Each structure stands twice: as C-alpha cells, then as structure tokens.
Image (tube, grey):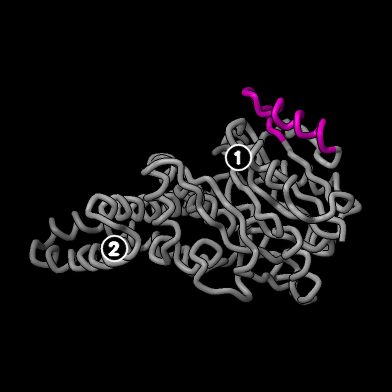
Amino acid sequence: MRVAIVIPCRNEEKYIGKCLQSIADCTYPKSLLQVWVADGRSDDNTRHVIASYADKHPWIGLLDNERRTTPIALNTGIKNSPDADVIIILGAHAEIYPDFVDKNVELLQSDPASGCVGGIIENINEDEASATIAAAMSSSFGVGNAHFRTGNAEGYVDTVAFGAYRKEVFEKIGLFDEELARNQDDEFNYRVLKAGFKIRLSLAIKSKYYVRASYSKLIRQYYQYGYWKVYVNRKHKTVTSVRQMVPMFFVAYLFTLLPVFILSPLLGFIWCGGLVLYSVVAFYFASKKSNGLIGLLNIVKAFLCLHLGYGYGYLVGILHFIVLNRRINENSSKLTR
C-alpha cells in the first residue's frame, strides 16, 4: 500500500530533524512512502532542516502553509497525496518506531471495518518538569480514557493520536475542519465514526513524543482544547465524548465555593467535601507515578493544570459559542505550540 505521512510544522528546528530521521530509519519500503512537511512560514532554521532531508531523500517534500493553521497544513498534505492508499497524520514533536508504518498498514489490511488505526504515545522527557507532566498525562486520572496516552487498553476507541487513515475515509467524509485551531483530529474522528467506520487502537503501534516542558504551556494547551471542544459540540449539535464534561463540572464547582461560604459557612464546609475528595484521589494517582514527595506534589500540580485549563476553557467556550453565539476570527485559529 502507498503511504503518505503529513506533518504540520512551524518553528520546530529543535525537533523536526529527529522526526524526519525516525521516518528515514523506518523499515517500510521508501518506494511506497511519501512525506509532506507543511510548514507555516517558519522564521527559524526549520525550513533549512527540512530542505536538507529533502535533498537526501526524494520522498520527503516541503509544502507552504501560508495561513499557518493546523487543519490547513493537514489538508494541504492530503491534497498533495492523490495516489496514497493510506495517510498518516504525524506531529513535528514526534518520532516513530522503525515498524510504525508497517504495523499501521498491517492492521488496516487485517481489519476491513477500521477506517483509522493508531497506537500509543511514549513520552520523551527533557527535564524534570516534562517528566512530571508526562507522568500526569499517562495517568487515567489526568486524561480519562484516552488510552493512546495511558496504554491501559486496546481495541475500538473514539480517537487516536497520529492516526493512519484509509483513503476512502477522506473520499467519504471530506477533509479536516479548517475553522478549528484545536481539536481538529477529535472532530475528524467523530465524523469517521459517524460515517460508519471504526477506529482501532493497537498497543503494538508505538511512537514517541516530546512533552511540553512548562506548566504554563500545559495549561494554555488544555484551555484551548476545552475552548474549541465547545465549538465542535455546537457544530455537531451533540456532546462528542463524555469525559470532556468532567473538568468543566470541576471548575464550575470551584466557582461556587465562595458564594456557598458567603450564604452559609456550614454548608460551605460541607461543600468543601468535593475538594477534599478530589485531593485524595489526585494524591492517590500521583503516588502511583512518583518516587518522592516533590514528584508527588508536582504531579498533582500537573493534574490541576490539565483539569483547570480544560474546564475553564470549556466554560469560556460555552459563554462565547453558546451564550453569546460568537463567530471564529482568524487570529484565534493560528498554528501554535
């Protein structure tokens, strides 16, 4: 099967070479492989790195993404792959295992019901902060039933990271939604399932991912995930996954603490029971991932970044997209990291 790998990219000089080298080292026949890096006008050394790999490997190409949005980068690569039987979406911060492409293709061939297959992400930690964040993101308490992060189960799921899609999927449901700054893969996978295809996760398919190394970046990232999830829900007139609601209710609960205390101190202390319960559960799951007190506290901090960021973003999204019925502006859809 002919395979195209599409990589959205902007200002990734530190990582894009590692990503492309991992693809160059993969065992899939290069005569059946095409790689497109859709670059959003990088102003660092990224384009030079890509060009150097393209010079050595004719199956690697550079495409311009003038509007600098992720879904347009993905769609540009897909449109430039008319002969591909399978299209794999990859991140510039990712590295693939040598058999990554082979195993994706084998699983698609063995499971005709699946329109998309994917595997688990192994986090690469560059410092103590990224190690802590990676631990939180590999916990079911941190990310719910996102099995591609936790590796807790395999089989049919609602979404995967770095999915491999049959060409027929795009022919039937179209391309990625170009209005979305975040959640474009989740939204696309929702349409995949709605169209009757299945999405399958295999623990044998593995890739690596360089984790965000700061709590501020993490909370901004998850704020955007929560915010844009509301837009996706409004567009499809449904809640696309149940786990998205939990952080929103947690943040809404925190907002009610002070008013409840003002109205009734006794009821306020009772109301605090929820916060105590959250803390107990957070520390329990953090203890399964940490080796010491500092690590334990930092993982709990990362849990809070995940849940508060997503939950607050979701509430703001409700205000903007549901209550005020706001439209998307182009500045809010820029390709970011």
Q: Where's residue 189, x and y in %?
A: 66, 63
Residue 310 in picture, x, y percent from top left: 43, 53
Residue 279 belongs to magenta span: no
Which residue, given by chain and number where applicable, does mark 1 sit on?
333
The three-letter code of the residue at mark 1 reads: Ser
The x and y percentages for residue 201 are: 63, 69
- Residue 249's x, y, as percent? 36, 63
Q: In which quarter of the image is residue 101?
A: bottom right
Q: Is residue 20 left or right of residue 305?
A: right
Describe residue 42's horizontal placement relative to residue 260 as left or right: right
Sequence-first disc among 1 and 2:
2
**Residue 52 falls inside the magenta stretch:** yes
Residue found at x 63% / y 70%: 202
Q: Which amino acid is tagged 2?
A: Ser
Tell me if residue 205 can be seen: yes
Q: What's the magenta region?
A: 39-57
Query: On the image, which quarter does residue 13 sit in?
Result: top right
Specify whether residue 239 is in view.
no
Q: In which quarter of the image is the N terminus?
A: bottom right
Give the quadrant of the C terminus. top right
Pointer 2 residue:
287
The correct choice, above or below, for 334 with respect to 297 in the image is: above
What secondary structure is marked by label 2?
helix
Q: Which residue is drawn at 39% across and 40% down?
A: 216
Residue at the (60%, 69%) spot, across then down: 203
The residue nearer to you, when weighing 202 against 168, is: 202
